[in-house]
Image: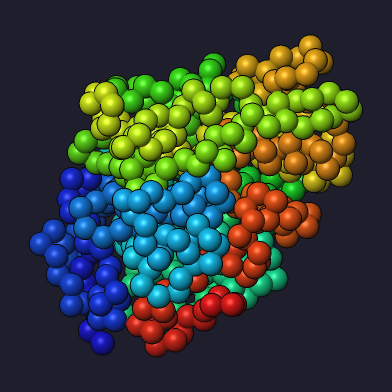
Amino acid sequence: MKTIKHIYIYILSLVFLGISSCQLAEELDDFKPLNALDANDAIIDESTSELALAGVYAGFHQQNSGVGIPEIYTIPSLMSGVLINTFLFNNDEVQGYVNNNPLSVNTSQGLGAYTRMYDIINRANWLIEKDEALTDDKFPTPGRRQEIIAEAKMLRATANFYLLRLWGQFYDNTSPYGISIRTEPSRSGNALPRSSVSDSYEAIIDDLNYAIANGPYLRAKYYTNTAYAKGLKAKVLLYQGKYAEAATLAKSIIDTQDPNFALSESYGEIFLDHSTPDLFDSAEILFGTKGEPAAGIGIGNVIGTIEAVTPTYINSALASTVIAGQTISHDATRVSSTVMSGFFGFDSLKSNFNFFPPANIYEMVYHLRMAEIYLIYAEADARATNSVRSDALNALNTIRERAGATTTGNDGFETYPASITLSQFLEAIRIEKRIELGVETGEDWFDLVRYHFVDGFDVTTVKPSATNPDKYILPIDYVTIEAGKNVVEQNPSY
């Protein structure tokens, strides 16, 4: 097997060279794209490192060839019932997600999402390896070498986390069904076996710890930063069941009271103006991928066209819960005010892009927002203490108050009272996240899965077709398994 000496340096406007099913079976050295540079020459100083870093960020954009973006974000919401496919894209693969019985062959969306995340990881690995070998004198900006490595590690951690929660048994720390962890650039077509779930989490946390210690404070909200690293680590710890640690870290972000990382004054202002790049500057965002005409992210092209927000989800905002005799509505206007008309009148949510009016040319993928940090803290603190403490209740109610909830103690869209029980509180958080974060990165599905394995929650009460817990995660497409000579083990029940 020859040694690959090429790293793909992508800028935002370059055409993505996707890994197709045929390509997976071939040697990586067979690919010599026009926009490739020899690895030994590509990353030699600060300016070339910045170019390579832009290429890692570009992996989260939708490009002209290949798939995977935005499917990595939308597949979970198809599985949760928040999204449904329209007649424009009604094939067996999408029906498998909608029916909670995903296909394990011919999955252009699933295979594309899987390989896209590993493409991001490989780009990051090349950059990390080369920058770790350089010396600080190659970087005129003090500390920038460590910052670039930290940003690359945050992006690698993000991609690994997205892989783990869709293709790994992320809900079971003892499971052998984690993901293939790659910390070095791919120099051959050889597959790596899957790591355990605990080892997968450890790799993600290691990257985030480095980023917290060495990352930049804030360049722009569409670049990773130390606040994002802390927030993502808190989220990962919550998924791991390390609740006390997750609560402490999430609370530290809230208590910093940094105006650059704070709840927006109103919910709508985060999503509704798609006509200017101001969309990318919200204090609410810890990290997001920006979409604009030269570098789209695909959300607006998909949700409202080939996929639509379901009436069931829209109507769920009108539901209510009774707490100590008080009927409390789940939502007021968060869902209704951010529903937009897409192609053929299909309902979009939060992400209208290039539809009506034509000035809507900006969109964003919200990898993490401050609202989620408040809700992570509320859940983690309740699970860690096995109680509903006032701080945790206040965190939940702060999100509701921002959405317009009142505190009169009457029926309607109200804050939750101190009389709420632990089980009611945890369920209130799940519902709150489903409404607050709907269609953003699939949290509406992953919370259902987590609650099932932690609390015994019956997922079929929300999604009747989700009857087989083995199929709460996706199969690895057999093209990948066969190309890797069966080194990668398939998930159970597939």
Q: Position of residue 481 (x, y in %)?
A: 42, 81
- Asked whether 434 or 466 is in front, the reply is 466
Q: Is residue 275 above or below residue 122?
A: above
Res 135 quadrant in image? bottom left
Q: Nearer the viewer, residue 103 or 394?
A: 103
Q: What residue occupies the far top of the structure in this picture? A: 408
**Residue 451 visible here:** yes
Q: Give the residue displayed 28% in from the left and 68% down from the top.
A: 19
> Residue 202: in sight, yes or no?
no
Is 59 displayed left or right of 249 in the figure? Answer: left
At x 47%, y 40%, the residue is: 309
Which image quadrant: the N terminus? Answer: bottom left
* Residue sitting at x 23%, y 26%: 358
Q: As displayed, is residue 316 above or below residue 394?
A: below
Counting labels gives 0
Determine the residue positioned at 38% across, 84% down. Answer: 482
- Camera-side residue of 307 and 449: 307
| 456 is higher (above) or lower (below) than 442 | below
Please identify the quarter of the rendering in which residue 8 is found: bottom left
Tell me where residue 124 sits by quadrant.
bottom left
Residue 62 x %, y %: 29, 49
Q: Quadrant of the C terminus?
A: bottom right
From the top left corner, tell me how far across and down residue 366 is, in percent. Answer: 45, 38
Name the spot of residue 329 as percent of width and height, x first: 70, 26
Colour scheme of the picture: rainbow
Q: Is residue 339 left or right of residue 189?
A: right
